[in-house]
């Protein structure tokens, strides 16, 4: 990554605005993105939890899936790629999904929305080309249409509702995971911070004016990728390529809540997704390892890659995301731990700079979520 | 005050050398959330990793700029790592070294030279 040439990087439509706001631009997932603004990661994080933070997440992939036959054909075709109930998702509602591979690993995680006569999907930036190819190859009866002319903005925090309502009247009535098309903006009440908030898809040509209107609302500040990462970590949310990847199954990743009854053993549409054999077996017998929350006892952060040991010295796992949680005011981490050592309250040792320091297996999230149910 | 290429500042205090990191370094690191200090009465050699600083972004080391004995450390940084960002060249000194001969400092940059470096 170190030698990524400037010329190879993709540019956000709002780059000039980020620079005007003092954003420090760094390469991320092939894009030049603001990692922080002059306030810095700590203040930006706390601001999002106490007021409202505006994030530019236009690097993410937006895709429309349109049926060539009926909408139910499309939903069932999409179900063949994911261990998730697509058929049961009502119009105007959004759901979390996971593409799995034949080995039961995770190819990407995503959000999808039923918009009546089509599905709207948001996937990770680094995976979007592969996801589009995967969906195109895996759903022959479906038109897979990348959306390339829209920005995606997230407005998160307790002040998000009032700020967005002032710019897009009507959004205050939405509940968590509702989706509405209002004029030419597409609004979802969801996000990646654990806070109440929205993700808003806006036509590229209007995005800067829209972002400026939001930034002019009381309490709204621009927030960079650095705080986005610490916010999602406190909320216990996975970062693809770190906490989940092609080797981790949804059951190991503790994402069983994302797999609805209809797709599990005894469900109406049991199995029928890539990796079903492993995933259903892990449901029945328990996985070999589990993603857990980890609280280092001292002040030293345990970052990605820190090896974990049982108190008797047996290697039991590894940290996949870790750092300092500004709202928790302590170091926090997530990682995979052998199931026998994954019970909440278990003390493990994490090796930091050659020293094995105590760390406790903890419930996720670290910071309570405040979704508007 | 003298400056190293590793963005440390060195200040003479009696027969001791006080070591901290520059404002430029503190800004580059971002919000500091953890500081690990050396034990006092340890002999260190130039280039030894003496302290660990963790910011919201990453971990970095402070290297001993010269040979010497650590005679004091700033324990305040352990409880309040954010002081490194608030007052990097004042209250947020890291450690004090006892050296044989203060003339070893002559090799380091003065303020103008350092400002040219970070330009």
Image: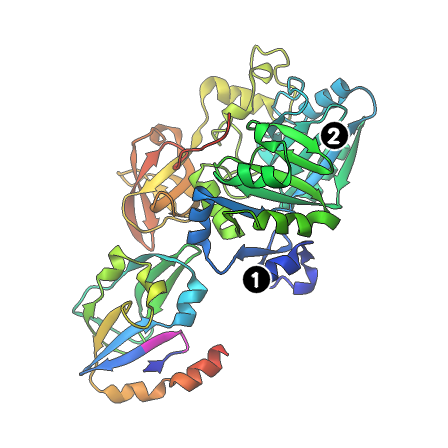
Q: Secondary structure at mark 2?
A: helix
Q: Is residue A284 placed above or below B93 in the rendered structure?
A: above
Given the image, what chain letter belongs to the residue carrying mark 1?
A
The answer to which quarter of the image holds residue B4 is bottom left
Q: Is residue A27 visible?
A: yes
Q: Residue A176 in the image: x percent, y percent?
A: 55, 28
Q: Nearer the viewer, residue B28 or A48?
A: A48
Identify the residue position indicated by label 2 in the image. A138
Check if residue A346 falls in the magenta segment. no
Q: Is residue A304 visible?
A: no
Name the image quarter holding the N terminus of chain A.
Answer: bottom right
Badge 1 vs badge 2, beta-carbon distance below 8 Å: no
Whether marks 1 and 2 lie on the same chain: yes
What is the magenta segment's predominant secondary structure? loop
Residue at (41% x, 69% y) in the render: B25
Name which of mark 1 and mark 2 comes first in the sequence.
Answer: 1
Q: Residue A199 in the image: x percent, y percent?
A: 60, 38
Q: Tell me where the magenta segment starts and ends, as one range.
A: B5-9
- The extreme right residue here reads A68
Q: Nearer the viewer, residue A90 or B100?
A: A90
Check if residue B6 falls in the magenta segment. yes
Q: How many marks?
A: 2
The Cα–Cα distance between marks 1 and 2, rounded to whole angstroms, is: 35 Å
Does residue A225 appear to the left or right of A324 in the view shown? right
**Mark number displayed over residue A2:** 1
Q: Residue A336 in the image: x percent, y percent?
A: 43, 36
């Amino acid at each position: 990554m170190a030698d990524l040439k400037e010329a190879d990087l993709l540019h956000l439509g709002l780059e000039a605005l980020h620079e005007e706001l003092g954003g420090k631009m760094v390469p991320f997932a092939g894009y030049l993105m603001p990692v922080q603004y002059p306030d810095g990661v700590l203040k930006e994080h706390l601001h999002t939890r106490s007021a409202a933070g505006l994030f530019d997440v236009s690097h993410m992939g937006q895709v429309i899936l349109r049926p060539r036959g009926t909408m139910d054909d499309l939903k069932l075709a999409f179900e063949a790629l994911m261990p998730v109930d697509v058929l049961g998702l009502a119009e105007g509602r959004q759901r979390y999904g996971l593409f799995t591979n034949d080995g039961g690993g995770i190819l990407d995680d995503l959000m999808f929305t039923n918009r009546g006569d089509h599905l709207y999907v948001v996937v990770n930036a680094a995976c979007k080309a592969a996801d589009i190819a995967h969906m195109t190859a895996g759903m022959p009866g479906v038109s897979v249409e990348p959306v390339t002319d829209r920005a995606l903005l997230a407005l998160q925090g307790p002040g998000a509702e009032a700020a967005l309502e002032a710019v897009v009247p009507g959004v205050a009535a939405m509940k968590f995971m509702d989706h509405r098309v209002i004029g030419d903006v597409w609004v979802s009440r969801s996000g990646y911070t654990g806070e109440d908030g929205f993700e808003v898809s806006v036509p590229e040509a209007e995005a800067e004016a829209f972002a400026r209107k939001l930034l002019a609302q009381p309490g709204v500040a621009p927030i960079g990728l650095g705080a986005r990462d610490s916010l999602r970590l406190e909320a216990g949310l996975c970062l693809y390529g770190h906490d989940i990847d092609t080797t981790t199954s949804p059951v190991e990743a503790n994402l069983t809540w994302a797999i609805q009854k209809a797709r599990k053993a005894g469900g109406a549409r049991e199995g029928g997704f890539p990796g079903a054999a492993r995933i259903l077996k892990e449901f029945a017998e328990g996985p070999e390892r589990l993603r857990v929350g980890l609280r280092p006892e001292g002040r030293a952060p345990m970052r990605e890659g820190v090896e974990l040991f049982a108190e008797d010295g047996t290697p039991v796992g590894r940290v996949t995301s870790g750092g300092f949680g500004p709202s928790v005011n302590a170091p926090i981490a997530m990682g995979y731990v052998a199931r026998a050592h994954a019970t909440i309250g278990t003390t493990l040792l994490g090796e930091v700079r050659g020293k094995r320091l105590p760390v406790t297996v903890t419930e996720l999230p670290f910071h309570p979520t405040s979704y508007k149910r | 005050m003298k400056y190293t290429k590793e963005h440390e500042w060195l200040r003479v205090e009696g027969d001791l050398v006080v070591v901290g990191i520059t404002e430029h370094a503190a800004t580059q690191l971002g919000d500091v959330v953890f500081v690990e200090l050396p034990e006092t009465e340890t002999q260190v050699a130039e280039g030894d990793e003496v302290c660990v600083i963790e910011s919201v972004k990453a971990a970095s080391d402070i290297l001993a700029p010269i040979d010497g004995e650590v005679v004091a450390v700033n324990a305040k940084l352990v409880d309040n790592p954010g002081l490194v960002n608030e007052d990097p060249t004042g209250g947020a000194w890291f450690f004090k070294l006892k050296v044989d001969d203060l003339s070893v400092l002559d090799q380091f940059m003065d303020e103008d030279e350092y400002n040219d470096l970070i330009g």
